[in-house]
Amino acid sequence: MNLETKTLKTDVLIIGGGTSGCFAAITIAESSKAKVIIAEKSNIKRSGCLAAGVNALNAYIVKGQTPETYLEYVRNDSEGLIREDLVYTMSQRLNSVTRKIESLGLVIQKDESGEYVSRGVRNIKINGENIKPILAEAVEKTPQITVLNRINIIDYIIKDNKAIGAYGFSIDENIFYVIYSKAVICATGGAAGLYRPNNPGYSRHKMWYCPFNTGAGYAMGIRAGAEMTTFEMRFIALRCKDTIAPTGTIAQGVKAPQVNSSGEEYEKSYGANKTFMRMYSTVEENKRGKGPCFLKTSGISKEEEEELFKAYLNMAPAQTLMWVEKGMGPSQENVEIEGTEPYIVGGHTGSGYWVDTKRSTTIEGLYAAGDVAGGSPQKYVTGCFAEGEIAALSTLDYIKGRENVDVDNNEIISKLNEVENFLNEEAVIYSVEDIEDGMQKIMDQYAGGISQGYAYSQGKLKVARERIDELLELSKGLKAQDMHELMLIFEVVDRLFVCKILIKHLEERKETRWRSFQENIDYPQKDDANFLRFINSRYEKGQIRIILRNLVRRDDIYEHRH
């Protein structure tokens, strides 16, 4: 199958039309006359992590709190290993971006005095089932923004260590895209599907994180030689069993404690109340034979139960449907909880591109926002909005006086040939699904998946590294009969690249800093003396080079010198 080559030019290319991508585009359009292209693998009306909606904004400066107290919360929750400059510049914008999304039509719940209804110290309640269509509508009614739905971007166009665009292909038509831009914003989301998930077979995509976020943004940066950070800080969500619905809605909504099978509250006995400790304590209770574990909801009022029914219909309807089907709601029965498989997601942890306060990566002209931007955990939805806004304003400064730059036609032909090589009907031994199953099994058993209680050893990581490399080699022989299958090939290859970097980062952090998230059997204790610093990496000529970076405090000035 031969593909038609289509060349486009714009001022700013945004890869990914999710939370950060849409907000960045809106910001650029409101602040300038610059032309924007959003390249979205799905359709921006229902793509990314907000596709199904959300019932709270988990990062907001409520009354009595400040950006400084939010920074302190993130620093404490992440065991001190954060980019304070990034967290602080993000937290300063949390409330203004909230007001912006409300002005676009998001319903934020208010009390009798007109104040936002809080759900905890940093959260406010919303009616967010339509949050993504609201964003999409704001984008689509702006003439200077062009949306390319169902375009799979596969690699950056790099010239002299500058990002000058990206390559991609249509999922519906036989078209290969060459998109030139003066600046690029990566907003593709994190990586799901690296590990074997909770649910098997037909239900394997019922997971915590968007299953269509396959680490493409990370993988493109890795292959381009961008500096990446903190991949070893995985995220494992504590969820309602089987439905994989959020537990925070219950824990904060009705103040439900975590209890074991004997009804004992166990979380506090494991130490500080931190995100990873909620997961770790549950794993340990099960190891000690005290499971299964639950959120204690039996005995809540019918009014509280009704609120939970409504809340889950906003973003995880399977949980409400399960209660209805059983004829037994949370007021009658505790909600069983379990951990998910690990994810790489910079909106909750510190994984992603190494960026400066402008959200510029180490590749000039390339910016990162949201789940792909590293160093700033606990962003959640509003933090991703804030980083999209920062990246957008930074690109506008960067593109002043710049013109589009092209690459040699031979380079384009080479990339096109690479893509077309997958497009034929040759008989193959391995399918995409075979490679994916193999990857997930390897990561589960040798790199700290569910079956291992999230723990790993140096010896097991060595096996994982060797076998992931074998799968990467096998993936070169995959074949696709249509453009959809071609997309699946590139998705599994991207995941394998993310696995490769993740394994190396896990090997390099010879301590255990975030229990369960990063549980190193060989080094079970935290080691501030040697590891209160960032583990970064660059992929150069097929090898991973590790770079150790010192902490960056709130008032430090750290900017890239490309």
Image: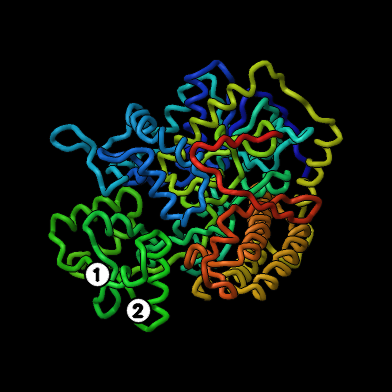
Q: In this view, does 325 lie to the left or right of 187?
A: left
Identify the element where label 1 is drawn: loop
Circle 2 sits on which residue? 291
Three-letter amino acid code of the residue under disc 1? Asn
Question: Which residue is at 48% across, 30% downward?
Answer: 389
Depth check: 263 or 492 in front? 263
Depth check: 47 or 460 in front? 460
Q: Give the tally of numbered discs.
A: 2
Viewport quadrant of the C terminus: top right
Question: Which residue is at 69% across, 34% downward?
Answer: 561
Identify the element where label 2 is drawn: loop
Three-letter amino acid code of the residue under disc 2? Gly
- Vertically, is 76 above or below 369? below
Where is residue 64? Give x, y as percent.
26, 40
Circle 1 sits on which residue? 334
Where is residue 388? Give x, y as percent.
50, 34
Sequence-earlier tag: 1 or 2: 2
Measure how far apart labels 1 and 2 are at the Cα level.
Answer: 13 Å
User: Which residue occupies the extreme right position in the image?
Assistant: 410
